[in-house]
Amino acid sequence: MAEKLKNVATGIVSGIAVGLIFIVFGGILCLTGIGALIGIPLMIAGTMSIFGGGAVMGLFIKNGKCPYCDSAIVWIPIQPGINCRACKKRIIFKDNVPTAIK
Ligand SMILES: [Zn+2]
């Protein structure tokens, strides 16, 4: 349990560290004028990296129940379907609702 918390903390810290590096580097590139073409996306990526670990992932990860066996499942909305970890059956998502394949 402590080990898991340590991993989460390390993930958050490294996410922030990478984000800050991207933002600083992006900011320097922006100062060069033409470098802003790369600098601005870098700064956006850096900001996303900082918030990405917890907040953004929390918004994107969906959870629900397997339509076959009622086991708890989690998925990312960009996934067209997953296999249930409990019953191994294929689940597809229709409007973000886990649906059994007929
Ligand atoms: Zn299942």
Image: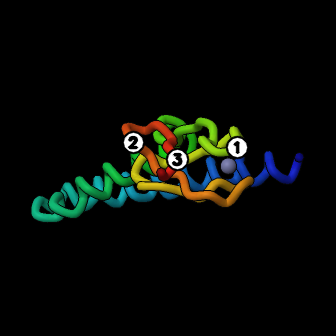
Q: Which mark is residue 94?
A: 2
Q: Residue at x 54, y 48 (%)?
A: 75
Among the two numbered marks 1 and 3 on one chain, the one whose residue lies closer to the N terminus:
1
> What residue would you read off at disc 1?
69
Q: Position of residue 2 (x, y in %)?
A: 88, 47
Secondary structure beneath label 3: strand
Q: Is residue 50 in view from this perspective?
A: no
Image depth: mark 1 or mark 2 in front:
1
At label 1, which amino acid type do we have? Answer: Cys
> What residue would you read off at disc 3?
100
Among all residues in the image, which is located at the extreme left?
34
Q: Position of residue 52 (x, y in %)?
A: 48, 46
Q: Quadrant of residue 95?
A: top left
Among the two numbered marks 1 and 2 on one chain, the one whose residue lies closer to the N terminus:
1
Give the Cα distance between marks 2 and 3: 10 Å
70 or 54: nearer the viewer: 70
Image depth: mark 2 or mark 3 in front:
3
48 or 93: nearer the viewer: 93
